[in-house]
Amino acid sequence: MRLREPENFKNLVGGRGKGYEGGAMPTVPRLIVATRNPHKSLEIRAMLGAGWEVLDANDFPEFPVIEETGDTFLENARLKAEGISRLVAGWVLADDSGLEVDALGGKPGVWSSSFGGEEGNHAKNNAHLITAMRGQSLRSARFLCTMVLANAGIAQADFCGTVEGTLTDAPQGEGGFGYDPLFIPAGYQQTFAELGQDVKNRLSHRALALTQAISWLTAPPEKLV
Ligand code: ITT
């Protein structure tokens, strides 16, 4: 998915595109993604294309880790967006996301990142999910993503995206990250990890939330900083 370039991007805090070495290169709007998960920012960068400069918390080693103490995706996205937005000028986008599994009463949900016992360990998370789902005939699940846009330390808007699907009983495919090798989106026969980044970026929970966030950011009335 490629989102259109914003018509009023002159009013967004801009930066020079990476690789700018002087000359007449136009300023592009800058979005700082409040994440340390490089897979998320890679997807967001690919979806936005060259019309945006996308940075993340890994570009700012001095940024603290924001504790995710909320019980909902919205609370955690807001904590991350506002926490980073207090430290940097311009628009900050936070993404809190996860997998909701019907047979597990909605788990791992908000705690998707540490389901296997170790924060951010995708292999352990997947192994734990496979074990938890062994023998289960109800295989339905969904990825959810809540995004919050913040500026000057204050959340300004939030957006949600959901993609329904089913779980395999063993990993399939090498692409994507996290639970992608176990998740077959509705209407497809392969996992997100097999379908590849272009397909995932057209239909994912993250794509659906990002489309709304960018529309909001670039629609009149102009969002002056
Ligand atoms: P940040 O908080 O720094 O953004 P994180 O990975 O910890 O990074 P979350 O707290 O939002 O982010 O947890 C998201 C987890 O949900 C992620 O680690 C995966 O386990 C899962 N997840 C979210 N989106 C996913 C996707 O597109 N594909 C596969 N798994 C995903």
Image (cartoon, rainbow, N blue to C red):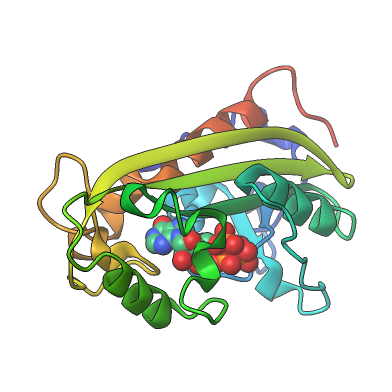
> Is 158 displayed left or right of 125 in the figure?
right
Quadrant in the picture for residue 69: bottom right
In the figure, 166 relative to 113: above or below? above
Q: Is residue 220 left or right of residue 51?
A: right
Residue 25 is situated, as x and y percent measured from the top left of the image, at: 62, 53
Q: Residue furthest top?
A: 221
Image quadrant holding the C terminus, namely: top right
* x 40%, y 69%: residue: 178
Query: Is residue 75 something that shows in the picture?
Result: yes
Give the residue at x 14% y 57%.
Answer: 190
Does residue 15 appear to the left or right of 171 in the view shown? right
Towards the viewer: 135 or 122: 135
Residue at far left of view: 189
Residue 18, can we see it?
Answer: no
Q: State whether residue 100 is above or below residue 178.
A: above
Looking at the rendered image, the quarter that the N terminus falls into is top left
Q: Is residue 129 left or right of residue 144?
A: left
The number of discs equals 0
Residue in the picture at 42% in, 49% down: 105
Which quadrant would residue 86 be assigned to in this image?
bottom right
- Nearest the viewer among 35 and 143 is 143
Please name whichever residue, 15 or 33, is drawn nearer the observer in this view of the structure: 33
Residue 22 at x, y percent in the picture: 69, 64
Residue nearer the viewer, 20 or 120? 120
- Residue 146 percent across, percent down from the top left: 57, 43
- Which quarter of the figure has residue 62? bottom right
Give me the residue at 25% from left, 64% from top: 182
